[in-house]
Image: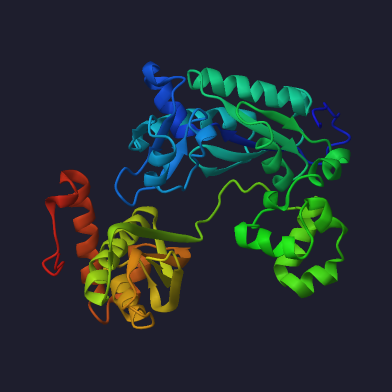
Amino acid sequence: MPTGTGGPRKWLRVIVHADMDAFYAAVEQRDRPELRGRPVVVGGLGGRGVVSTASYEARPFGVHSAMPIGKARRLCPHAIFLPPDFKRYGEASDRVMEVFARFSPLVEPLSLDEAFLDMTGAEGLFGPPEAMARRLKAEVREATSGLTVSVGVAPTKFVAKVASDHRKPDGLTVVEPDQVLSFLHPLPVARLWGAGPKTQAELAKLGLETIGDVARADRSWLVKRLGAFGEHIHRLSLGQDDRPVETEREAKSVGAEYTLEEDIVGEAAIRPHLRRSAGRVARRMRKEGLLASGLRVKLKTAGFRLLTRQCRLPSPTDSERALETAALELLGQFDLEVPMRLVGLAAFDLSAGGAGTQAALFEEDGREKRRTAEKTVDLLRERFGKGAVRWADDGE
């Protein structure tokens, strides 16, 4: 299995994927010694909650992330179930990201507990790839008082990501440039980016069960059967992935959604949740200085069918009212007699903006006054709490 220490001439690129092990649960076990060695499940504890992270002690019972919390309780009733504490997780994440920044200026965070690093040319500072990965792991453990990280090192982002999952927890896998295909090809197609359960079933019907099977298939045949996705997975199966590590990843969308304790039916029941979502999205955009030119409404039925509709906005905006108005118009395109278990929206086609940008857009119709009021409410809520100010027309 790939674990070598290739020299700098063999490595045109050295890409590291670092993934903290069962991060939320690990932070809880670190901070509460009585939880160590016991199954711990972190997630929403309500009837519609889902698992965010399960400790490795809980996983042999079949508990995993994104599982309904009720099912996790049935599978592992003796586990310790905890609500997430994002403040503590964020503090731990800050320590981890500080370590990553000491190893490379090219760090692409994917979440609180996961990042890519481009360490091309760093051999002179940290040694060959395996040595740099071991040092990275040791410094993360020291900086976080014992948390472990699994690391994959490879010539591409895709292979590095697969490698970091290979020996979890506390794993280290280095895939040399000349070992990429021998590493990938025995693996199941589930390891290909974008190959979810439905895609895996479709690939199985085509006789494709391993990444090697995909690599040996004719590319034009894959494209004919699977469209652009066929081209995508064929490239990955050959280890082809030239995407750079992006240090400043622009947000593609800003969204908010609510999984409901009970199913709801009809526009009147859905409207308050869309209003809440619009408020959350607008506040985040104003905080980050973003404007949106598109809006997408997302509903999930009681039968777990995902429904979406989207539209272009009349002008770039960060206004809660503008987002809510567009969202309510989109509701007319759904069958609202079907029970829904999730309601949300996302603003997309984002661009940088500010008060000066929007003033020109809104001064003719008075919407700038509403936007100014919304910004004032943001400040009041930040200072005195979310419940300190309510709009007169909230209707909730």
**Residue at horizontal 42 percent and vertical 71 percent from the top:** 296
- Above or below for 146 versus 347: above
Colour convention of the picture = rainbow
The image position of residue 19, as x and y in percent, is 58, 35
Residue 374 or residue 167, whichever sits in front: 167
**Residue at horizontal 61 percent and vertical 26 percent from the top:** 170
Question: Looking at the rendering, in which quadrant would you find the C terminus?
Answer: bottom left
The image position of residue 355, as x and y in percent, is 32, 64
Q: In this view of the protein, can residue 119 be seen by the observer?
A: no
- Above or below for 230 versus 92: below
Q: Is residue 123 left or right of residue 35?
A: right
- Above or below for 41 versus 142: below
Question: Looking at the rendering, in which quadrant would you find the N terminus?
Answer: top right
Quarter of the image where one finds residue 173: top right
The image position of residue 61, as x and y in percent, is 50, 35
Q: Residue furthest left?
A: 392
Q: In this view of the protein, can residue 280 be seen by the observer?
A: yes
Number of numbered discs overlaid on the protein picture: 0
Residue 175 or residue 78, whichever sits in front: 78
Residue 151 or residue 365, whichever sits in front: 151
The image position of residue 247, as x and y in percent, is 59, 46
**Residue at horizontal 31 percent and vertical 65 percent from the top:** 278
**Residue at horizontal 29 percent and vertical 71 percent from the top:** 324
Q: Is residue 248 left or right of residue 205?
A: left
